[in-house]
Amino acid sequence: MSTNDKIDFQPLHGETELSPPEVYAANLVEWAVERHASDLFISDSESSVLVSIRRLGKIEPVRQLARQYGKRLQGHLRVLAGADAGESIRPSDGRGVLATPDGSLIDLRLSSIPTLYGQDVAIRLFDPIRGARSIENLGYDDSEMQTIVDLIHRPSGLILVAGPVASGKSSTLYSAVEALNDGTRKIHTLEDPIEHSLPGVMQSQVNLRAGLDFADLLSAVLRHSPDVIMIGEIRDSRTASTAVRAGASGQLVLATIHAKSCAEAVDAMLQYDTMPKFLAGALIGVINQRLLRKLCPKCRKPLLDVEMDIGPRIRSVLCGQEPRLYGAAGCEECFGDGFDALTCVPEVMRMDHRLCEAIGNGASAAQLETIAIDEGMLCLAEVTAARVLRGLTTADEANQAVADPLLATLAALAKNAE
């Protein structure tokens, strides 16, 4: 493809592009991937078709297209993903691969739903080369990494990854599976939907229309002699009970669950009617995490040294640095945004005798958290504050992701210093 086909993606209003939709789509996806966008949206509005991306967790408008051209672009992408291009009154989905002008192959997962003015086409983007992140590159510090690597290399047991929507839970599971996928283990994943393909891993997708949910898939997979099972989400009692049974009977089970903390993740499993004694025997660890935008190291700006008492627990994970607040500036490296990546902030609860005994006795989430902190666990707010004071992110970013008085105080200090 010649350089003349390149498109300058700047916000315009209701324009009809000169390039054919297939050329525009290829250049658009390449442009989005270069900016580390995770999603592309092509959405009908009252008078035009809106193109936007999700970059580092935030929505950024890209362009407004004339409705006729936007419809052709939507249709091309639906065909590329194997979705019914003519189906516009019911939700549809599909998968495909798009070749960009620079020769990259980008995996696309498309979902389309009807809206007031037409349809919203959402496309998850994944670059198998640049997008794959090893567990070492998720943002864990050395002590967190050592604990998590030790957990995932246990021969059996249940590991829960907790957090709200868009907290990177699936990425953590994929990275853990990649770390274990050395050819010596039989690994099965149960997903809804399958995010992207993992060579050498048996991947199965939930199909609720056919009556196949996580619990049904998990029961079937247990008959295939797996060593490792990844469960996309525990969201009902049958899946929870079967996951506990698998973890207690010789398999390593990795699963996500919606919860605000490690202790609440354990409580959620108990609310799903799992037997406390069985859960205590199967559970080996819980990772509760959030995603934060990471400051661009090329242009971050120091704001002020923090002289308030942050306590010995936080100071112990500052890696010898003096606590300081930083702000975002913006340069060519980070496309003027001030942030260049997403980083994972984890709270890690590793099971020991005291915690297992408390779970077996049906302890509350508050009691479990008190025991875990007494045993040395840093809570999520402490871990996040340490990231802020090391200059990895801003106090405002942290305060938006984790509600805590300390982070609110740091955000106020940063605002006054700007």
Image (cartoon, rainbow, N blue to C red):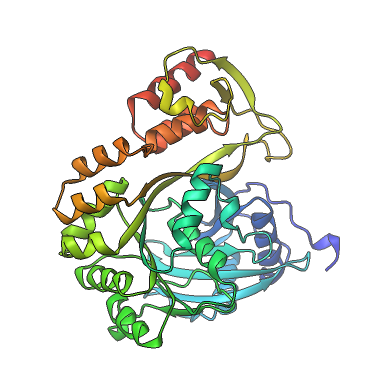
Looking at this view, name the residue that lies furthest to the front: 353
Horizontally, residue 354 falls left or right of residue 20, namely left
Provide residue 106's location: percent of width, then percent of height: 65, 68
The quadrant holding residue 197 is: bottom right
Q: Residue at x 45, y 35 (%)?
A: 384
362, 110: nearer the viewer: 362
15 vs 406: above or below: below
Provide residue 93's location: percent of width, then percent of height: 45, 75
Horizontally, residue 249 falls left or right of residue 17, namely left
Q: Residue at x 50, y 15 (%)?
A: 306
Provide residue 133's location: percent of width, then percent of height: 60, 57
320 vs 225: above or below: above
194, 257: nearer the viewer: 257
Q: How many marks?
A: 0
Provide residue 363's location: percent of width, then percent of height: 16, 48
The C terminus lies in quadrant: top right
The N terminus lies in quadrant: bottom right
321, 175: nearer the viewer: 321
The quadrant holding residue 204 is: bottom left
318, 237: nearer the viewer: 318
Q: Is residue 63 visible?
A: no
Q: Residue at x 68, y 40 (%)?
A: 335
Horizontally, residue 168 falls left or right of residue 5, namely left
Q: Is residue 12 visible?
A: yes
321 vs 400: above or below: above
